[in-house]
Image (cartoon, grey):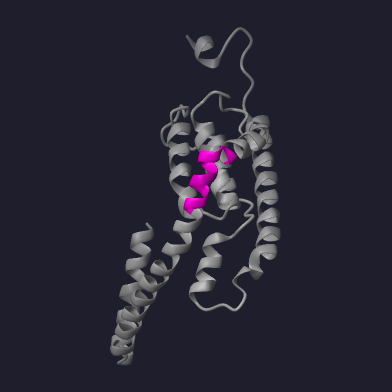
Amino acid sequence: MVNWIWLGMMVVSVAFAAVKGRVREVTEAAFGGAQTGVTVCIGLVSILVFWLGLMRIAEQAGLVRKLARLVAPLVRRLFPDVPADHPAFGYILTNMSANLLGLGNAATPMGIRAMQELQKLNPSQDTATPAMCTLLALNTASITLIPTTMIAIRMNFGSASPTDIVVSTLLATFVATGAAIAADRWYRSRDRHRLPPLPVGGSAETKGG
């Protein structure tokens, strides 16, 4: 669907440019945007490599494991329907640790692996489980202690004080995470109360059989 939306936007843009006689401006903007994208990506590489290297050092030193153990009790409360010894917990903890450090690019692969592991617990292949919804909400609104990627972008564009966003980012992500957790708990509670009670003497399948 997203690909069709982007295609539609491009087709409409070119069509309007042709009608208004401004195809040249659209072409120049397209190439200029592509050049800016490449410049930003190259500028981000050094910063991301630096922080990923620090995270690798922290992992080798055991700091990431200590951080994971610190947040593990909270994670188990947020994911009560996932077995404590399930591999998904390791990926969830790594994903949350990377998000705390503002390393969204590093957190994404771990989030995908966590979703894959949670899918193994999913009885329905075409419907997300409550745990999958919780992970998506937390990954989107994660508390960020150091907005590494945004600092790198601000540095790349010549910001005089690229770290000025640290406090505001921390406050914004704290509020967003609180709202995400509150919404997740509310939906879980609502769905739990909406589930039909099992008939006396066994499950619905057993009763019907």
Residue at 57% across / 44% down in the picture?
96
Q: Which image quarter is the N terminus in? A: bottom left
In-image side of 14 versus 36 (left or right): left
Residue at 65% across / 48% down in the picture?
180
Residue at 56% across / 77% down in the picture?
159
Does residue 61 show up magenta in the picture? yes
**Residue 136 in sight here:** no
Front in this rendered view, residue 82 or 64:
64
Front in this rendered view, residue 72 or 177:
72
Quadrant of the rendered structure where residue 85 is? top right
Does residue 206 show up magenta in the picture? no
In-image side of 34 versus 149 (left or right): left
Give the main secondary structure, helix, strand or loop, of the magenta stretch.
Answer: helix
Tell me: residue 144, above or below residue 193: below
- Image location of residue 142, percent across then percent down: 61, 51
Magenta segment: 52-63
Question: How many numbered marks appear?
Answer: 0
- Image location of residue 88, percent across then percent down: 50, 32
Quadrant of the rendered structure where residue 23 is? bottom left
Tell me: residue 25, above or below residue 194: below
Tell me: residue 43, above or below residue 115: below
In-image side of 160 versus 57 (left or right): right
Front in this rendered view, residue 119 or 110:
110
**Residue 179 in sight here:** yes
- Image location of residue 165, percent across then percent down: 64, 67
Residue at 70% across / 55% down in the picture?
175
Q: Residue furthest bottom?
A: 21
Front in this rendered view, residue 54 or 107:
54
- Image location of residue 65, percent across then percent down: 57, 36
